[in-house]
Amino acid sequence: MNPFLPARIYTMEANMPDITTRDTVILGSGCAGLTAAIYTGRANLKPLVLEGHEPGGQLSITTLVENFPGWPEGVQGPDLIENMKQQATRFGAELRMAHLDSVDLSKHPIELRVGKEIIHTRTLIIASGASARWLNLPSEQALIGHGVTSCATCDGFFARGKEIAVIGGGDTAMEEALFLTRFASKVTVINRSERFRASQIMLDRAMAHPQIKFLTNTKVEEVLGVDEKDVKGLRIKNNVTGEESILPVAFMFLAIGHIPNASAFKGMVDLDDEGYIKTTSNVFATINGKILPGVFACGDIQDRRYRQAITAAGSGCMAALEVEKYLEEHGH
Ligand code: NAP
C-alpha cells in the first residue's frame, strides 16, 4: 500500500469498485504520452489518451528525425507519431481528440472535465508537454517545417552549407548557434534587445566563434518565402534606428524559450519557477514536496533540460510502469 495515500480513500476505493472509473488517463499524445499508452495498454489497463491541443506534440511539426534509435535512415516526425498511435491502439488504448478543461487532483478517483463529460480515473499521467514559443508572425507560422523550426537537434543537419538565423539571446540560442556551426556556413543570432539573457560563458563562446555573427536590438518583421514554401530570408528591423533590411537566410531557428503546458495544474502540483511540473524519482508529481498519489508526469512538461524524443519516450515508459505498480499496490 502506498504510504502517501490516506487510508480512508484506499478503503473506499477497494470496497466500492466503480466500473465507470478508469485505471488510467493520459494527457497528451506526444512521444511521452504515446509511450505511456503503449505500456499501459499492454498491461491491459485500457488507457484513455486525451490528445490535447497539439496532437502528436512537437514531433508532429518536425520533419526528419535522425536520432531516434532504430531508424538508420531517419523517420519523419509525423510518421513516428502515427506509428506510436497505431502501436498504442493495437494494445487497447483509446485515443480521443479532446483536451482537458479542468481537473481535481485532490479527489480520489481523480476527476477530469472534458467538455460536458466528467471522467474518473485512479491514476493520471500528465504528458502535455511544452510548446516552443513562437514569434507568432503569419509568415513564420506558414513556414514551420519549411525552414522555420524550433529544434536545432532535429533540423540542423538540413542547414548544411547554408546561411541561417537563430532568434533569441538566452543560453538555448547560444547553444543552438554553436551547434549549428557544424552544419551552416554562417549563423546570425538575432536578439531583440542589447542585453543577453545567456550566461557569460555561453555568450563568450558564441561571440568568439568565427562563423557566428550577432544582430542586437533587432526584430524579425517577416519571414520571406511563403509563396515558394521555403525560407528565402528575413525582413528585419533595428528597434533603435527603425531601419529595415533583408537578411538572406535559408533557415530560421527559434530559440526564444518554451512554455510548459501546465497551467491546468497550478496550485495542485508543485511547479518550478518556469512552470514545469516538479517530479521526484523521475515521474512522481508532488504537492508541497510530498508525492501526490496516483499522479505522474513525464516528457517535456517535467523536463526542461533534455527535451528529446527519446528521453520523453523513456519517461513515458517509467510513468506507465509506476502506474501499474500503484494500481497493483491498491488492489486493482
Ligand atoms: P530564456 O533564458 O528565457 O531566453 C529567452 C530569450 O528569448 C531571451 O533572449 C528573450 O529576450 C528572447 N525572447 C523571448 N520572447 C521573445 C520574442 N517574442 N521575440 C524575440 N525574442 C524573444 O530561454 P532559454 O534560452 O530557452 O533558456 C531557458 C532556461 O534553460 C534558462 O534557465 C537557461 O539558462 C537554461 N539553459 C541552459 C543551458 C546550458 O546551461 N547549457 C542551455 C539551454 C538552456 P528578452 O531577454 O528580451 O526577453
Image: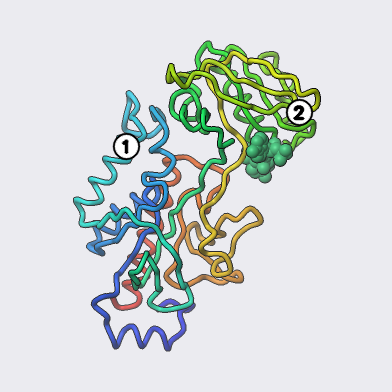
Q: Regarding mark 2 in the picture, which secondary structure is present there?
A: loop
Residue 171: tell me if it is visible: no
Q: In this view, does 217 lie to the left or right of 249?
A: right
Q: Mark 2 near ligand 1 (CB under 8 Å)? A: no
Residue 123: tell me if it is visible: yes
In the rendered image, the vertical position of residue 154 relative to residue 318, given as above or below: above
The percent position of residue 254, horizontal first and vertical second, equals 57, 32
Q: Is residue 137 left or right of residue 123?
A: right
The residue labelled by disc 2 is 239
The percent position of residue 195, horizontal first and vertical second, equals 79, 34
Q: Residue flagged by tag 1: what amino acid is it?
A: Leu
* Measured Cα–Cα span from mark 2 to mark 1: 41 Å
Q: Residue flagged by tag 2: what amino acid is it?
A: Asn
Q: How is the image coloured?
A: rainbow
Q: Is residue 134 left or right of residue 6?
A: right
Which numbered disc flags the more N-terminal residue, 2 or 1? Answer: 1
- The image quadrant of residue 181 is top right
Q: Can you tell which mark lies on residue 80? A: 1
Q: Regarding mark 1 in the picture, which secondary structure is present there?
A: helix
The percent position of residue 121, horizontal first and vertical second, equals 34, 71
- Residue at 53%, 41% in the rendered image: 132
